Amino acid sequence: MNTQSQSAILNEPGVPVIRNINLVGLKTLYIKEVRRFFKVQLQTIWGPAITTALFLVIFTVALGGGKREVLGHPFGDFIAPGLIMMGMMQNAFANSSFSLLVGKMQGTIVDYLMPPLSSGELLIALVAGAMTRAILVGTAVWVVMALWPGVHVWPMHIWAVLVYGLLGSSMLSLIGVLTSIWAEKFDQSAAVGTFLIGPASLLSGTFYSIDKLAPAFQVFSRFNPFHYAISGFRYGFIGVADSPLVAGAMVLLAINIVLGATCYALLRTGWRLKA
């Protein structure tokens, strides 16, 4: 009788059956996100990898970058890590900015809102899926660049590669989720990528050391969080950075916390997600 009564209480409407973290649901949504981009991996992984690697070809061949040195290292070795990080961040944004938006556009947003997942679990699954794509793209870019003659991309400080790779990827994943919540059509999401993510990536110090810039532009670069992700990631490969490592990590961590809290709050309220 006691067992039956307890079962009846647990099944009453409004009484949560899953009282802790829904690991099964979180894992299922994560796998769904990974399968979604992996089914078209030529477009979502290998295409961006080749496109990013073309920057290396242009600068080391067409512009004679192999004869130049930056921060005491050959130009190819200098820009390669930044290109890897740039590709990771851009694709993390591309993945997470598409998830909820396509649900709103196609009327399938209920697939994200109806399952027994908390706002935190939904956010974790979306960010983890985007970061997985970022890691796969980064690995593919690294493989392509490792095969390019005269370029050395073997990590010197693996901890820096992991820390800044994860911080940078998570930052763009969260920005993508925020964009996906806010945007109501693909044009709005594309505008964020075109007018914010793209310029911030290209002006982050990927192709140059900010120490060579005029003071006004150095100040601008210091306020660009992309710069800290790329500079710290580059340190993991060549052992040199043009920004303080600890300060950069703290800046990225603080931005991730603010973005994560904002996305969580918006998911809880259902802003622009629930009719």
Image (cartoon, grey):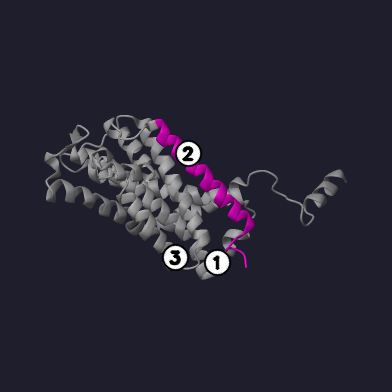
Tell me the mark number nearer the camera, choosing from 1 and 3: 3
> Disc 1 marks which residue?
108
Quadrant of the snapshot with the C terminus: bottom right
Give the answer, above or below, for where 146 lies relative to 202. above
- Report if residue 139 is visible in the image: no
Residue 252 is covered by the magenta coloring: yes
Please provide percent x and percent y for residue 60. Answer: 16, 46
- Report if residue 210 is visible in the image: yes
Callout 1 crowding tier (Cα within 10 Å): few <14, some 14–19, many ≥20? few
Q: Secondary structure at mark 2?
A: helix
Q: Residue furthest bottom?
A: 106
Circle 2: residue type: Leu
Q: Secondary structure at mark 3?
A: helix
**Looking at the magenta stretch, what is its main secondary structure?**
helix
Name the mark on residue 240. Answer: none
Circle 1: residue type: Thr
> Disc 3 marks which residue?
188
> Disc 2 marks which residue?
253
Q: Secondary structure at mark 1?
A: loop
Q: Relative to residue 20, is residue 203 drawn left or right?
A: left
